[in-house]
Image (spheres, rainbow, N blue to C red):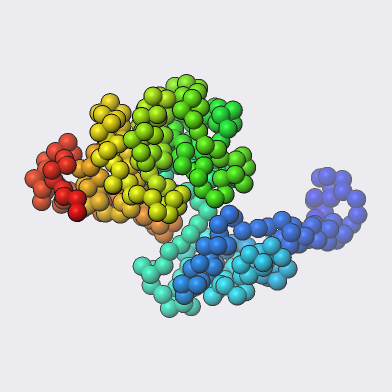
Amino acid sequence: MADLKRAFDLPGTPEEIHFQRYSLAQEFLRTRVHYREGAAELIKYLKALGKKLAIVTTTRRRNIDVYASQNESMIAAAPLSEIMDLIVTRDDVAHVKPDPEGFYKVLDALKAEPGECIMVEDALPGIRGAKAAGILAFGGGGPKAENFYEPLEAIRENGGWGIPTLKPWAVDVVKERLKEVEAVHPFAFAMDIDSAGLPHAGLANPPMLLKTEEELREIAAATNLPFIVKGIMTAEAAQKAVRAGAYAIVVSNHGGRVMDQGLSTAEVLPEIRAVVGTDTKIFVDGGVRTGDDVFKMLALGADAVLIGRPYVIAAYGGGAEGVQLYTEKLKAELKDAMTMTSCKSLQEITRDKIRLV
């Protein structure tokens, strides 16, 4: 503190400066630290399912104690003292992360095997793993600014290897964000227009709004990057996206979270392919978990498939290596399906290779 006092010519003794700094830090921990969006709901949901929950953190035990006993926001949302089975801090280990000592402590205390656990981290190793596996990752998308910027930075660090996803904000907001997207030189950019149907769409900042064909055309014309429109579930919507200048469309029901009783993507995909023709690329997501699922979607008319949740789990649990392993699993399963149906290339995976029941 003496060096800090001299460097900035601070008033008071070093002890007084230290006390003031400590008081400000404690106030910050009590009032300015909150759960990330969705985190409290997730851990309460997992707890209700009877799952064991633990935290491994590089922060001090005293800070965790503040979160648990004095941070009213966190206590109201999901009290750590009631929900977490174990919290390992830097005070409990000789070596902090990325050293695995803290995780070993959790495994030992909870009598768990590594294969039984999922680790959630606030980093983005998935894009690196995807690049190593030779696949493109769609990055970003969320109600908060960091949901856009963190994946964008990861794509930049990987030489543009990825497709940033924008939310259906107002057109002027989208145009401003497109300038930042262009700066990382991605292959293309996407917009999940069906996000406008989510319950929190109007509460997001900036708000997510329904898009007309004219607005989509204006967005497509604002950049030279290929435009991918995600959230298509009808032939009419597909035609509008194509007329607006979309390079590709994604047949997607947003994981079934926009309309609970909506159709599956597999049900609507053939009709959409029929009206779009072969000039526009069609991607599809929704329930794709195995190489067999990939085979089915290709047979129904997709040019490629998108997979979300399994890759999130692979990335959080195993980092880049986890993403690669899951990708290799998909490849092996798809290859087996092709062998059993006498398909020597992806182009030979046609509708007659499957039967809808």
Q: Quadrant of residue 139?
A: top left
- The residue lying toward the viewer, choosing from 270 and 255, is 270
Where's residue 197, x and y in %? 50, 45
Q: Left or right: 321 with respect to 124?
A: left
* Relative depth, front residue between 355 and 189: 355
User: Where in the figure is residue 64, as x and y percent of width and height?
Assistant: 65, 67
Q: Is residue 292 visible?
A: yes
Q: Nearer the viewer, residue 16 or 77?
A: 77
Compared to residue 261, the image places residue 80 above or below, namely: below
Residue at horizontal 40 percent and vertical 57 percent from the top: 313
**Residue 133 visible from this viewpoint:** no
Residue drawn 47% across the image and 75% down it: 50
For the N terminus, the quadrant is bottom right
- Quarter of the C terminus within the rendering: bottom left
Height in image: 208 above or below 173? Answer: below
Q: x and y percent of residue 151 in the render?
A: 49, 42
Q: Position of residue 281 (x, y in %)?
A: 31, 32
Q: Residue at x 16, y 40 (%)?
A: 350
* Residue at image point 49% right, 25% down: 214
In the figure, is residue 9 to the left or right of 352? Answer: right
Number of numbered discs present?
0
